[in-house]
Amino acid sequence: NAGVTQTPKFRVLKTGQSMTLLCAQDMNHEYMYWYRQDPGMGLRLIHYSVGEGTTAKGEVPDGYNVSRLKKQNFLLGLESAAPSQTSVYFCASSRTSGSFQETQYFGPGTRLLVL
Amino acid sequence: GQQVMQIPQYQHVQEGEDFTTYCNSSTTLSNIQWYKQRPGGHPVFLIQLVKSGEVKKQKRLTFQFGEAKKNSSLHITATQTTDVGTYFCAGYTGTASKLTFGTGTRLQVTL
């Protein structure tokens, strides 16, 4: 099993450009998450999904959109990149929580630089 | 909204010294998880605590969950250079499907 994979690993964008980050998991997990990590800020949740075809906003959703058309994939889109979106982006997945929350498995991250 | 703070933000120790990081939530947690992130890496799950007052050990690491389920700690005995990284606590509240991560404690260990 590859676990959670992310593409691309690194990207440089100019202000105003758009891009899509792809997350894929092969563990048949229901739940998927997108976080951003900035120095001294820990991990902040951008959007998440509790199943195919569903999405929900996290703590810092502005400027991002997501889609979960297939269970194994979770896409994060930046329509018009801004320098404030320079960050490391992590995708994570977990099994259905039910009444007991499960551990999250993280991808290797995507480093994004917006000039 | 829910906030999870960790102290200290950074600690530098000599190899062999002990290390403790503390995690405090503004709300009661149903459970708490700890993750470790090596420099340049991604967070990796270490352990989950569920019960009030629970204590779990993993070799040199001891994890505690407070009686009120609003705080937790991670203690490392006799640190080694392999312990270098950032340690995050993360908590769920009620039936929420999203984790709230703490701000993290970065540990540096030197010989």
Image (cartoon, coloured by chain):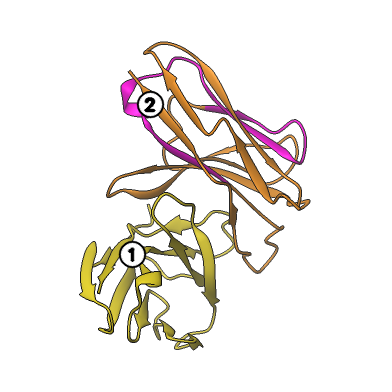
Chain colours: A orange, B yellow
According to the image, label 1 marks what residue? B26
Instruction: Say which of marks 2 and 1 sits in front.
Output: 2
Mark 2, secondary structure of its residue: strand
Q: Can you say whether A57 is above or below A107 in the image?
A: above
Circles 2 and 1 on the same subunit: no
Q: Secondary structure at mark 1?
A: loop
User: Tag on residue A113?
Assistant: 2
Q: Quadrant of residue A62?
A: top left
A89 is within the stretch colored magenta: yes
Please state the chain letter of the residue tagged with numbered disc 2 in the rendered image. Answer: A
Q: Quadrant of the C terminus of chain A?
A: top left
Q: Residue at x 35, y 82 (%)?
A: B75
Q: Residue at x 58, y 45 (%)?
A: A33
B51 up-or-down from A87: above or below? below
User: At which x and y percent is residue A3?
Assistant: 69, 51
Residue B10 horizontal/vertical position (percent): 23, 63
Quarter of image, res B74: bottom left
Image coordinates for residue A7, horizontal then vertical, percent: 60, 32
- A95 or B109, nearer to the observer: B109
Q: Is residue B30 visible?
A: no
Say few, some or many: other residues with alpha carbon within 10 Å of mark 1 (under 14 / 14 to 19 / 20 or more).
Answer: few
